[in-house]
Amino acid sequence: MGECPDAWNLSHPEEVAGVARRYGEAGSRVILTNTFRANSISLAAYGLAGCVSEINRAGVELSKKAAISALVFASMGPSGKLLAAGEVTEAELFDAFRAQAEALAAGGADALLLETFSELEEALIALRAARAKDLPVIVSFAFDTGKNKDRTMTGLTPERAAKAITEAGADAVGANCGVGIEQCVELCRRMRAATHLPLWMKPNAGLPEVVDGAVAYRVTAQQFASFVPSLSDAGASFIGGCCGTNPEFIRAAASAFSRCA
């Protein structure tokens, strides 16, 4: 707690590689990198803004080494600052995402995944910066707000997100984090109606609860996997697991997917 998770690529490389390896062994066809907040804006909070290239390149190399036969998609999360609130400028965002994308591409990533975005404008800036590296780019949003949990924190709908990202030239679009897999089925249907692009769906293991002061997720791996056929029928091209999931969830989901493919 309190440490910079991305910096573990340098300080605890074997532990990071071990996580990636377990997902590959569980049947993941795609694994990610430990680089979610490895942009200069987020790293600055830990005094590591000057380590963008080193941390990101190491993150890709560790996942590639552990991938077995899986592809490695490099994770790029939001800056943690709100553009609409004036906490950061468009130029600052573009420069930060461009530097991260360059380092991830240099490390050998197979694609770039822009994930857990809530602000459309920031996602579009990140996409523009990432597309300069001539790698496939996926843009994924976190829908967790509103009466039906179908809006991002800034009020963005699945339809508007899918349409805007498609028009901006991404290679795939989707949703991650936010809600559980049951709610993600409807999000997927709504996105499918708004875009022809492949859909990336990476839901949580249900909604988090606080139990005895700790965050807990009630959904089991088998319960999670039971919704994989519905998510596939709704148009998902990629199905994965976000918060609260682990290799056991992926193993169960892969098995369910193979039965409905």
Image (cartoon, rainbow, N blue to C red):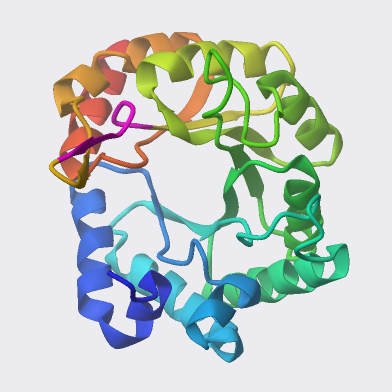
Q: Position of residue 113 (x, y in %)?
A: 57, 51
Residue at the image point whose x is 72% and y is 19% from the top:
159
- The answer to whether 105 appears left or right of 63 in the picture is right
Residue at the image point whose x is 37% and y is 41% from the top:
242
Which quadrant does the C terminus fall into?
A: top left
On whether residue 206 falls in the magenta region, the answer is: yes
Residue at the far front: name it.
Answer: 213
Asked whether residue 170 is in view, the answer is yes
Above or below 51: residue 217? above
Above or below 190: residue 201? below
Which quadrant does the N terminus fall into?
A: bottom left
Residue at the image point whose x is 85% and y is 62% from the top:
90
Above or below 208: residue 107? below
- The answer to whether 223 appears left or right of 34 in the picture is left
Q: Position of residue 139 (x, y in %)?
A: 64, 43
Between residues 215 and 170, which one lies in front from this camera angle?
Answer: 215
Between residues 41 and 159, which one lies in front from this camera angle?
Answer: 41
Place residue 29 in its image quadrant: top left
On whether residue 55 falls in the magenta region, the answer is: no
Residue at the image point whose x is 43% and y is 80% from the top:
58
Q: Position of residue 255 (x, y in %)?
A: 21, 25
Total marks placed = 0
Q: Position of residue 210 (x, y in %)?
A: 24, 38
Between residues 261 and 84, which one lies in front from this camera angle?
Answer: 84
Between residues 220 and 105, which one lies in front from this camera angle?
Answer: 220
Place residue 147 in its image quadrant: top right
- The answer to whether 71 appears left or right of 146 in the picture is left
- The stretch in magenta equals 204-211
Place residue 190 in its image quadrant: top right
Asked whether residue 235 is in view, the answer is no
Above or below 229: residue 28? below
